[in-house]
Structures are given as structure tokens and as C-alpha cells.
């Protein structure tokens, strides 16, 4: 079993402005191939080399992308896609802005801040329909609601502080009512009793504790007045207006949708790909990756995605997400989001 402190099991939020950065790893051009049709009557040239910038390592968080690569779905859309691993110090926004990646997966607050600061980016889909932030506690001393945190010690990392403060504001809880202990992403302080609760990702730390044999109790921010679309897909606005680039974006997102449809049906297969092929160097724990894949399906699939397709963003969710972001100082507007690419991917159906 992995050390619970291993960073490969965690996807931290980064709070920063729009930074200029460079990232190597351009995809190699594939030789030959025919012209394959993309959605919407447009086409992407077979073998078109593009990058998909992830916001963390190639673990099962990106189950659909791994399945799309493994099953040849990108190639079926005429693309040669390189999955570019991210990490705590990698910002997907400038990578996409620079053209080193056609599409990126990032955190909502960060791309909103980037756009506010002048980035030529659009949010074109949302992997997580429900906010994955939660507070986890032990079954011996359970914390089941935000109000249960009052007077208790809660571990919060510096990078998650803005989200934490916004969540408290949403629930009208004074910051002074809770004893916040600054910690990192390691759940050990909760396991040892140093804190009573721990701000976490629903798909990560609770599962790590479970694998460690520590029964955990969680409540999710999304269930208590803090709705948020997360793990959003982004592309340059100019890519959406350029016919050739737009065709590539549509083809990539169609493959993503098809890959995620497979991953939702078979989370164990996606976990095995992460452990045995795409993140071998990370020495991931198979049990943890399977449980993470199963848990995140509840965030990826809901009534809206069943009706409209995966990654869909309804007007109501965009409005709710914008209100949550505003509590943390991020000013989202409806024009930062668009479903135009997904409309081309799904063509009125709920599957790609």
C-alpha cells in the first residue's frame, strides 16, 4: 500500500494569478492517415498532433482520458493526442494560452481569475458536476454538518484557505468559531487525533483513510450551499472561432466524452490503466485507484449529464457556480462558459 502521504494521491488546488509559463512535450506528428470527419460537419486532419494538459499526474482522476488514449478514440477522431501530466506547480491556463496544449483541464476559480486577468480562454465543459471538496472526520468523532465544526479543530492547507473561507461565508459561520490548524494534504493529523476534521477532496483523503483501515465520515461542500463545477475543460477563445482549430477541439472533446462513458461503465479498468501503464512511476495503489474511480463517478454523472451528456453545464449550474466563486473573490460571468462545443459533440443526444 502507498504511503498515505504520497502526493500522487492528491489533487491540490492552486491559488494564483495568471502566470506566464512554458511547458515542453509537444506531441510527435503521426505519419500518414486519412481525413476523418469530426462533429458538426467539420473535420480534423488524421494525425493532427495536439496536447491535452492535465492538472495533475496521469492517475485515475483522468480515467476518461486514459480510456480514450487506450481505446484509440482520439485517433478515430483524426487526432494524435499527447496527455501532458500536470502537478501542483503546473498551471494549465498558460499552457493552453501559449498553444502548447489545445485543451486543458483545470480548477474553475483559477481559469476564471485567468480570464479576468486577460487570458483568451473559455470554459467548454465540466468533468465534475458536483464540488468534490469535503470535510472528513473519523467515525469515532464524526463531523456531519458545517455547524458540527464549531469549536472543533479543523485542518486546512494554505492553498485551500480561500475556498474554506468562501464555504464558511456561504454557511454564515464566523471564521473565529472554528480552530483552524494549518496542515498539508496528508491526512495523518486526523488519523493521530491532532485535528478533529480535515478539509479534503471526496475522491482522495477519505479513500486513503479507508485503505489505511480508518473508518471515516464526510460531508461535502456541495451539499451545504457551496455548489461548484470542477475539473473544467478549457480552450482558447480564438480556437473556437478558427474552423481548423475548432474541428480539433470538437474531435478531442468527443473522444473525451466517449472515454469517460467507458470509464463510468468500468472504473476498475480505468484504474488498472493508471496503475499499470500511465502512472507506473508513481507506484499507485490499485485498491485506492479503483475506489477513487468509483467515487468520482458520483461527481461526473447526474440527472443533467444523463439528459444532455457528460461535461454538460446548465445555465443554473453556471449561475450557482458563479455565486460560490464570488464568495472567494473570483468574479465569474456567464460569457466565460460555453456549451457550443458540447452541442456539436452530442448533436442533441446524451451520448457521443
Image (cartoon, helix red, strand yellow):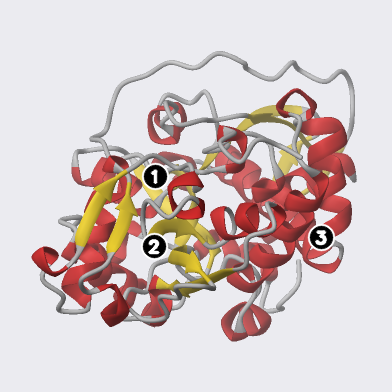
User: Where is residue 318, by image quadrant?
Assistant: bottom left
Residue at 46% x, 66% y is: 137
Closer to the chain start, of discs 3 and 2, is: 2
Give the quadrant of the C terminus: bottom right
Left/right placement of residue 72 relative to residue 159 reads: right
Residue 114 spot, x, y in % from top left: 27, 41
> How far is mark 2 from mark 1, CA to CA?
18 Å
Query: Is there any visible trace of residue 171 in the rendered image?
Result: yes
Image disc number at residue 13: 1
Residue that numbered label 2 is attached to: 197
What residue is shown at x 17% (from left), y 65% (from top)?
327
Quadrant where the N terminus lies? Answer: top right
For label 3, the crowd category at 10 Å Cα-Cα, with few meaning under 14, some 14 to 19 and many 20 or more, is many
- Indicate the secondary structure of the residue bearing disc 3: helix
Q: Earlier in the sequence, mark 2 or mark 1?
A: 1
Q: Nearer the viewer, residue 87 or 210?
A: 210
Discs 3/2, front: 2
Report which quarter residue 35 is drawn in.
top right
Residues tagged 3 and 2 counted as in contact (Cβ below 8 A): no
> Which residue corresponds to the image point at 27% horizontal and 67% vertical from the top-left?
152
- Whether 222 is drawn above or below 244: the answer is below
Q: Mark 3 sits on what residue?
A: 267
Callout 1: helix, strand or loop? loop
**How many C-alpha atoms fall within 10 Å of the one at disc 2: few (<14), some, or many (≥20)?**
many
Amino acid at each position: 500500500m502507498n504511503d498515505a502521504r504520497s502526493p500522487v494521491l492528491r489533487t491540490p488546488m492552486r491559488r494564483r494569478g495568471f502566470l506566464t509559463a512554458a511547458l515542453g512535450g509537444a506531441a510527435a506528428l503521426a505519419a500518414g492517415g486519412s481525413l476523418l470527419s469530426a462533429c458538426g460537419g467539420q473535420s480534423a486532419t488524421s494525425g493532427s498532433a495536439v496536447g491535452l494538459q492535465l492538472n495533475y499526474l496521469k492517475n485515475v482522476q483522468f480515467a476518461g482520458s486514459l480510456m480514450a488514449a487506450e481505446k484509440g478514440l482520439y485517433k478515430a477522431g483524426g487526432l494524435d493526442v499527447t496527455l501532458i501530466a500536470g502537478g501542483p506547480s503546473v498551471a494549465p491556463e498558460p499552457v493552453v494560452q501559449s498553444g502548447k496544449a489545445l485543451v486543458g483541464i483545470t480548477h474553475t476559480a483559477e481559469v476564471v481569475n485567468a480570464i479576468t486577468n486577460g487570458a483568451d480562454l473559455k470554459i467548454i465543459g465540466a468533468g465534475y458536476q458536483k464540488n468534490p471538496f469535503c470535510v472528513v472526520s473519523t467515525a469515532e468523532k464524526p463531523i456531519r454538518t458545517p455547524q458540527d465544526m464549531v469549536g472543533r479543530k479543523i485542518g486546512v492547507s494554505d492553498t485551500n484557505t480561500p475556498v474554506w473561507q468562501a464555504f464558511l461565508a456561504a454557511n454564515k459561520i464566523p471564521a473565529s468559531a472554528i480552530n483552524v490548524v494549518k496542515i498539508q494534504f496528508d491526512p495523518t493529523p486526523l488519523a493521530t487525533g491532532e485535528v478533529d476534521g480535515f478539509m479534503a477532496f471526496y475522491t482522495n483523503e477519505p479513500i486513503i483513510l479507508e485503505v489505511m483501515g480508518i473508518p471515516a465520515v464526510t460531508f461535502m461542500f456541495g451539499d451545504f450551499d457551496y455548489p461548484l463545477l470542477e475539473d473544467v475543460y478549457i480552450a482558447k477563445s480564438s480556437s473556437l472561432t478558427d474552423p481548423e482549430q475548432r474541428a480539433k477541439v470538437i474531435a478531442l472533446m468527443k473522444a473525451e466524452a466517449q472515454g469517460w462513458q467507458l470509464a463510468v461503465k468500468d472504473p476498475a479498468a480505468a484504474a488498472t490503466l493508471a496503475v499499470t501503464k500511465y502512472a507506473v512511476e508513481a507506484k499507485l495503489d490499485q485498491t485506492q485507484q479503483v475506489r477513487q474511480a468509483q467515487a468520482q463517478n458520483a461527481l461526473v454523472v447526474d440527472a443533467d449529464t444523463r439528459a444532455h451528456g457528460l461535461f454538460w453545464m446548465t445555465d443554473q449550474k453556471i449561475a450557482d457556480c458563479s455565486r460560490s466563486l464570488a464568495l472567494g473573490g473570483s468574479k465569474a460571468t456567464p460569457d466565460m462558459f460555453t456549451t457550443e462545443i458540447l452541442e456539436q459533440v452530442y448533436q442533441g443526444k446524451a451520448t457521443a
